[in-house]
Image (cartoon, rainbow, N blue to C red):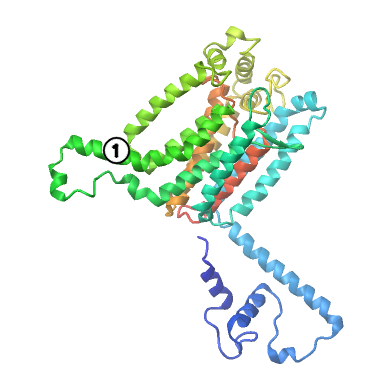
Amino acid sequence: MGERSWEDQTTRITGGSAPSGDDGPDSSGGGFSAFFSRVLDRLGFEVRSKDEKKEKTPIGDMPAKAWDGVKKAAANTRSIWLNKAAAFDKPLFIIVMVLVFLGLIMMASASYAYSYSHHGNSMYIINKQLVATVVGLLLMLFISTVHPGFLKGKWSYILWVVSIILLIIVRLLPGSKGVHRWIEIGSLSFQPSELAKFTAILVCATYISYHYKEINVTTYKKLSTKQKAARSKRFKYWYGLGRNFQTAVWPFMWRIVPILVLLVLQPHLSCTIIILLIVGTLMLLAGTRREYFLTLLGFAAVAVYLIVFLGVVPYGRTRVAVWLDPFADAKGNGWQNVQSLYAISSGGIFGAGFGNSRQKYMYISEPQNDFIFSVICEELGLVGAIIIILIFVTFIWRGFSLSVANTDRFQKFVGIGITSQIGYQMMLNIAVVTNMVPNTGISLPFFSSGGTSIVMLLAEIGVLLAISRESPNKVM
């Protein structure tokens, strides 16, 4: 069921209009005091009428009665909150919990050798991931009770400004291994690019929700009917194309380009690609004409070529060469790709068994991160890998079904954006691990280690669950 408005909840608490006579505690009075008395009575506190107040309660019984009232109020409040939280789509929630559980299990297997070698504790990485996952799950459950419309408008742009500020700060801070991606405070670290993905979804969905009709209007309203008829088809085509640029291309560009530029300067090419794919999907579904996508793809291809081969991303040219022939430098730059392919091939159909991967013993450089899927293939085989891919596909199908069916345009496009983000990351990670595309350092959602990543993912899932509460396709 959809979220009830405050007026509905007030009517349910007060029982409609104020009753007369002796229908409730202190019902003879009107105004705020009567309403407040009914609220307290609804929560479980014992509210006495004026006649009852004249009878004094023995002092010895006061603590017990007060404690009983507190317990009833807590029980009723918890019941109301749980009923609201549990109103989301159950299949989506189950799919997410399966992915979280499998991710923790596989990370425990993939990370213990690396943890012991680098930290002297085989449980170091999985312990940190468990803490981040618990925080993320609590945040997910809380956000799922908040109406998604809260993020529409000013709050989306506030997050947009915060993301840009954080991306500037992280670029000014000292980097690690030639990249600037983390803000470290003591033992904690935060990756602003994870917030930037969600911010891009919010600002684009906000614009679409306010200007959907303008995006899809390609006619020229200022001309009279006769003047419109007199114009040639070629004029109409170019006029419509220009109007569509004003409403369906430029507004997205000024919202996204600052984020993309700062990500390229980190450099963080994988996140840049993900945001481009997400925004492109939202633009296409919102009504941006296909001609612009062909043009933008051409500009993107030129930009990638310049970034890679002109040295904007220092390691770009090397990774392209490794992708074309990883075995040409198998013990150098191609080491990670070659060891990943060895792990996948040695898994066979049914795998070597859970925990029995050999490549995770320091052959794959960081098996708990971007290349965890190769460990999955080695331990669970082709069958296990296909099952995990199918779970992701089921999540994508369920997320799109709930989002598209939602009647609120903002919620619809936010849901599509979140689902697209997870789907694109999954596909690109598997493509990198299998050497189908150059290595871009992209993580596998719910499986790769990273506290910021799992917390932000689960927070976004909380938004998706909140969206599902108002979808007609929801399954209780």
- Name the side, left or right, on which 406 lies relative to 294: right
Please give the name of the residue rendered at 45% of the width and 39% of the height, measured from the top-left corner. 254
SS under mark 1: helix
- Name the side, left or right, on which 216 lies relative to 35: left
| Number of numbered tags placed on the structure image | 1
Q: Nearer the viewer, residue 218 or 409?
A: 218
Please give the name of the residue rendered at 59% of the width and 22% of the height, measured from the top-left corner. 349
Q: Nearer the viewer, residue 190 or 102?
A: 190
- Name the side, left or right, on which 212 lies relative to 444: left
Residue type pointed to by label 1: Gly
Q: Locate residue 475, reporting x and y percent.
A: 51, 53
Question: To which residue does mark 1 refer?
Answer: 242
Q: Nearer the viewer, residue 299 or 354?
A: 299
Q: Residues within 10 Å of mark 1 (few under 14, many from 20)?
A: some
Q: Locate residue 2, reporting x and y percent.
A: 50, 60
| The quarter of the displayed image where residue 270 is located | top right
The outermost residue toward the right is 60
The outermost residue toward the top is 328
In the rendered image, which quarter contains the C terminus? Answer: bottom right
Q: Locate residue 323, reporting x and y percent.
A: 54, 15
| The quarter of the displayed image where residue 231 is located | top left
Would you place residue 395 above or below residue 297 in this image?
Answer: below
Please give the name of the residue rendered at 55% of the width and 83% of the height, measured from the top-left corner. 18
| The quarter of the displayed image where residue 321 is located | top right
